Image: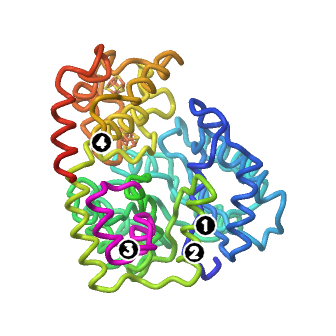
């Protein structure tokens, strides 16, 4: 691993078709990778299902086939929620090596350990399988990404001390959030002496575009620091953090992140205080705490083909919208329905999506609420008033 703590999350790359996550703009991905590597950063984080199972291929095309193996490091993951029988692990692992074009992974993780996936890992002997791969020299360091409560993390780390690092969702908005338990999970990892890789430091982009009232407070302290840079600095400054992943989608985000991560300085105590002050403002204005991870829709989970993360993003945007007289989000929604995705009101409340959601979002309730606006003609039955209230609160 290079000594620079910014990792490239290879899951929000530029795409050529907004309705097809697999349609990565490969020439642009090459340019982004070139820029990243040219500045001395080396760490790429991919996974089997990112970009609709195309992220590993793009990593091969943009990085592996164009640079010597010593120029970069790769973290990949075993997709526990996709597995249907134990032998599939071998098949997936071989497929990942082929897709990435490598014969070993510098870092390899059990993907998204939570109570359900931990049971799968135990049933299929995933820990033993991956230790075997490490002993064969096909894996450098072994860890897991985690999306559950702190007690569960404590249990896993107690039962599997051989794990060398953990990947956690840590950001200043979720630091004290009881659903995500960022701080508690961080403390458990430190108690077990594990180094930490941080994912979602900007909470899926939510902390890059914050309400104007919150941004004004940050800009008053450092006019040239972007809101995203505050979020990444917070995460990267925590002791024991070896890497912060950012899913950079364009040249501007990449340049911004590299500008302060090249020679990183942690936030001061005073700066942290300011950040927690704006956290409270932001919490009030984000309706649904969805990160856009897409676990709720991967692998045909929704029998009604409801595009939950996209609809939630539209709803959140609608709530932040400062112009209540017109909704472009409704147009986006209509476009998605025209592509054949299910309406929010078609939800049959089976609960498949909620079982997969690492943020523990009450998806069915939120769909019902959002449907009141998106599935009816005109401005919606209630949303205009609510949105105005929210807009007023941010002034
Ligand atoms: S509860 Fe609704 S949105 Fe969730 S998977 Fe079932 S039908 Fe789809
Ligand atoms: S609803 Fe949950 S699982 Fe679905 S994209 Fe949002 S955070 Fe991820």
Please state which of the two labelled residues, at mark 3 or mark 1, is closer to the viewer: 1
Q: Is residue 259 left or right of residue 60?
A: left
Q: CA distance from mark 3 to mark 4?
A: 28 Å
Element type where label 3 sits in the image: helix
Main secondary structure along the magenta-highlighted residues: helix
Q: Circle 1 is placed at which residue position?
A: 255
Q: Is residue 18 left or right of residue 165?
A: right
Q: Are marks 3 and 4 in contact (CB under 8 Å)?
A: no
Query: Who comes first in sequence, dot 2 or dot 3?
Result: 3
Query: Who comes first in sequence, dot 4 or dot 1?
Result: 1
Q: Quadrant of the N terminus?
A: bottom right
Q: Circle 4 is placed at which residue position?
A: 322
Q: CA distance from mark 3 to mark 1?
A: 18 Å
Please report the residue visible at 47 percent of the width from the left and 41 percent of the height from the top.
Answer: 81
The reply to whether the residue tagged 3 has its Cβ within 8 angstroms of ligand 2 is no
What is the quadrant of residue 386 in the picture? Answer: top left
Q: Is residue 103 left or right of residue 309?
A: right
Q: Residues within 10 Å of mark 1 (few under 14, many from 20)?
A: some
Please report the residue visible at 60 percent of the width from the left and 46 percent of the height from the top.
Answer: 48
Query: Who comes first in sequence, dot 3 or dot 1?
Result: 3
Q: Circle 2 is placed at which residue position?
A: 259
Q: Are marks 3 and 1 in contact (CB under 8 Å)?
A: no
Element type where label 4 sits in the image: loop
Q: Residues within 10 Å of mark 4 (few under 14, many from 20)?
A: some
């Amino acid at each position: 691993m290079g000594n620079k703590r910014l990792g490239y999350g290879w899951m929000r790359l530029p795409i050529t078709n907004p309705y097809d996550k697999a349609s990565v703009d490969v020439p642009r991905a090459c340019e982004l990778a070139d820029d990243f590597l040219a500045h001395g950063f080396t760490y790429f984080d991919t996974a089997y299902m990112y970009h609709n199972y195309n992220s590993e291929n793009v990593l091969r095309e943009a990085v592996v086939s164009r640079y010597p193996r010593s120029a970069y490091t790769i973290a990949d993951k075993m997709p526990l929620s996709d597995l249907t029988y134990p032998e599939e692990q071998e098949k997936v692992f071989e497929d990942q090596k082929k897709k990435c074009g490598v014969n070993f992974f510098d870092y390899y993780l059990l993907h998204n350990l939570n109570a359900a996936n931990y049971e799968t890992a135990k049933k299929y002997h995933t820990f033993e399988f991956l230790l075997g791969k490490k002993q064969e020299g096909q894996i450098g360091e072994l860890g897991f990404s985690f999306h559950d409560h702190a007690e569960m993390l404590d249990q896993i780390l107690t039962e599997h001390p051989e794990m060398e690092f953990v990947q956690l969702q840590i950001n200043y908005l979720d630091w004290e959030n009881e659903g995500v338990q960022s701080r508690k999970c961080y403390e458990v990892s430190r108690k077990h002496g594990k180094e930490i890789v941080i994912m979602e430091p900007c909470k899926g982009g939510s902390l890059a575009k914050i309400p104007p009232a919150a941004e004004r407070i940050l800009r008053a302290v450092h006019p040239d620091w972007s809101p995203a840079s505050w979020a990444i600095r917070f995460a990267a400054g925590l002791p024991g953090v070896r890497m912060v992943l950012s899913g950079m989608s364009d040249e501007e985000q990449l340049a911004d992140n590299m500008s302060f991560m090249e020679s990183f300085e942690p936030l001061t105590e005073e700066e942290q205080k300011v950040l927690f002050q704006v956290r409270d403002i932001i919490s009030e204005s984000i309706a649904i705490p969805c990160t856009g991870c897409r676990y709720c829709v991967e692998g045909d989970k929704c029998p009604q083909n409801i595009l939950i993360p996209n609809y939630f993003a539209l709803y959140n945007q609608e709530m932040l919208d400062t112009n209540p007289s017109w909704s472009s989000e409704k147009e986006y929604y209509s476009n998605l329905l025209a592509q054949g995705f299910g309406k929010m009101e078609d939800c049959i409340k089976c609960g498949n999506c909620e079982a997969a959601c690492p943020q523990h979002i009450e998806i069915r309730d939120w769909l019902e609420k959002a449907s009141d606006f998106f599935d009816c003609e005109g401005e919606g039955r209630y949303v205009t008033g609510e949105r105005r209230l929210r807009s007023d609160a941010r002034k």
